[in-house]
Amino acid sequence: MSSSSAELAEVFSSIQGEGGLIGLRQVFVRFRGCNLQCDYCDTPTDFSAEPCLAEQTPGRRDFVPVENPVALHRILSLIEGWHRGWPGVHHSVSITGGEPLVSHEILRSWLPHLRSLLPVYLETNGVMHTALELLIDHIDMIGMDIKIPSTSGCTDLWDDHRRFLRVAATKDVFVKVVVGEQTEEWEVERSAEIVGGEGREIPLILQPITRLDGTIGIAPVRVLELQEIASRYLRAVRVIPQTHKFMGQL
């Protein structure tokens, strides 16, 4: 695969449903592949022979299959067409996955071109700090996760998250932690310590696990208790569920 083409799952226009840019309209470019296997993840992460589903009209869900790997010029042409037909609608382009930094070599070629059309927002699991260093100059905003054991099933990622945030903090960044009924106080405290170590002003978002039926997988009082713990270290701790599921958005 050349640096001008990538394995993609989807390209579409929708409302950002979680994190610090919630409610804004974005172009989503979803990459295949991930370096982690989180327990709550509902996104296919493997490389496969399946085509990329590309929306033709922004937000109208008129998807057509496009053979993988997808050439960069196809994506640029699509976004340019949306610009002409729906000027000013999109706030930014969301580079998401999976884990898009798995494809960091391709992104080194892609991001300057995408950024010439829209600001670039990276959604990431916050682990691949070396890859981020290669791309940071071509990124405007970063939404990074801290994967805690109780909800993700991943362990021993604390140092990777700390090193990642140190690079990401040079840009507009927020940190997201998915919390559930089994989440322990020390997990939230350690996450807040990592964020606070890079800046008390960096927003931390506690995202309650949102089930497929739209219900929340943690008691309301427990969420408030976890917010109180994180607020000892940070100035802006927000609780935001996955709102796109409530709205029927992608």
Image (cartoon, helix red, strand yellow):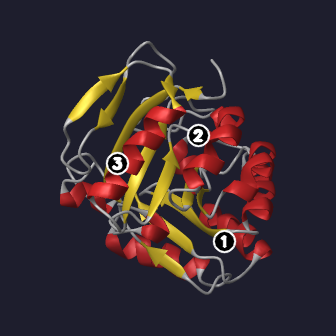
Residue 103 placement: quadrant? top right
Which numbered disc flags the more N-terminal residue, 3 or 1? 3
Residue 204 placement: quadrant? bottom right
Type of amino acid at the residue the image marks with label 2: Pro
Mark 3 to mark 2 CA distance (whole Å): 24 Å
Residue receiving disc 2: 100
Q: Establish if 199 lies above or below 31.
A: below
Type of amino acid at the residue the image marks with label 1: Ala
Q: Tell us which disc is closer to us: 3 or 2.
A: 3
Which numbered disc flags the more N-terminal residue, 1 or 2? 2
> SS of the residue at dot 1?
helix
Residue receiving disc 3: 81
Q: Nearer the viewer, residue 134 or 145?
A: 134
Q: Is residue 108 in view?
A: yes
Q: Position of residue 236 (x, y in %)?
A: 56, 83
Q: Position of residue 207 (x, y in %)?
A: 44, 63
Q: Nearer the viewer, residue 105 or 115?
A: 115
Q: Are marks 1 and 2 in contact (CB under 8 Å)?
A: no
Q: Establish if 203 lies above or below 106.
A: below
Instruction: Tell me, for residue 192, which label it has, or none.
Output: 1
